[in-house]
Image: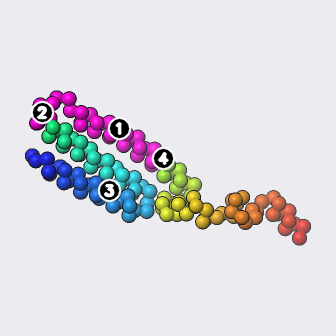
């Protein structure tokens, strides 16, 4: 097998993942696209390792060892990423990245937020209504 076939497939997978990261708004789909990009890199690592081991008679297979290391790191990354997305979804009610960015910048103000500039309705608000 020629080296061009896995390299072209890897480039197509990486470009698909890059498009998914740039175009998607859902955080879970962005994480899936990042995983697709990592798998494209893993495919390149294994393909170049096989190609180099044929030409130099190398038995170390460092590309395959690096691929296993990358898979382990990717598994930990997706576990932590999904935990963060689920925690944010429970707190904010959405996994839309644009809405989360807007709340981080302060465009979405909540009435109970002391930093939003609007008076909070709490014990002082009820006391003011009772005296009025």
Dot 2 or dot 3: first in sequence order is 3
Q: Which residue carries the number 2 mark? A: 56
Q: Callout 4: helix, strand or loop? A: helix
Q: Which mark is residue 131?
A: none
The CA span between labels 1 and 2 is: 28 Å
The residue lying at 82 percent from left, 60 percent from top is: 124
Q: Which residue carries the number 4 mark? A: 83
The answer to the question of whether label 1 and label 2 lie on touching residues, with beta carbons closer than 8 A, is no
Q: Which mark is residue 17?
A: 3
Stretch of the chain drawn in magenta:
53-82
The CA span between labels 4 and 2 is: 44 Å
Dot 4 or dot 3: first in sequence order is 3
The residue lying at 58 percent from left, 61 percent from top is: 105
The residue lying at 64 percent from left, 64 percent from top is: 109
Dot 1 or dot 2: first in sequence order is 2
Q: Residues within 10 Å of mark 2 (few under 14, many from 20)?
A: few
Location of residue 130 with respect to 9 vertically, above or below: below
Q: Residue 58 is drawn in which quadrant? A: top left
Task: Tell me, yes or no, whether the highlighted magenta stretch contains residue 65.
Answer: yes
């Amino acid at each position: 097998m020629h080296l061009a076939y896995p390299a072209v497939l890897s480039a197509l997978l990486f470009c698909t993942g890059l498009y998914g990261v740039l175009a998607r708004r859902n955080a879970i789909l962005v994480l899936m696209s990042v995983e697709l990009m990592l798998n494209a890199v893993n495919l390149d690592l294994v393909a170049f390792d096989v190609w180099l081991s044929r030409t130099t008679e190398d038995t170390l297979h460092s590309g395959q060892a690096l691929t296993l290391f990358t898979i382990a790191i990717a598994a930990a990354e997706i576990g932590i990423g999904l935990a963060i997305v689920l925690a944010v979804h429970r707190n904010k009610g959405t996994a839309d990245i644009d809405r989360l960015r807007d709340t981080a910048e302060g465009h979405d103000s909540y009435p109970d937020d002391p930093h939003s500039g609007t008076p909070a309705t709490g014990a002082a608000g009820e006391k003011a209504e009772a005296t009025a």
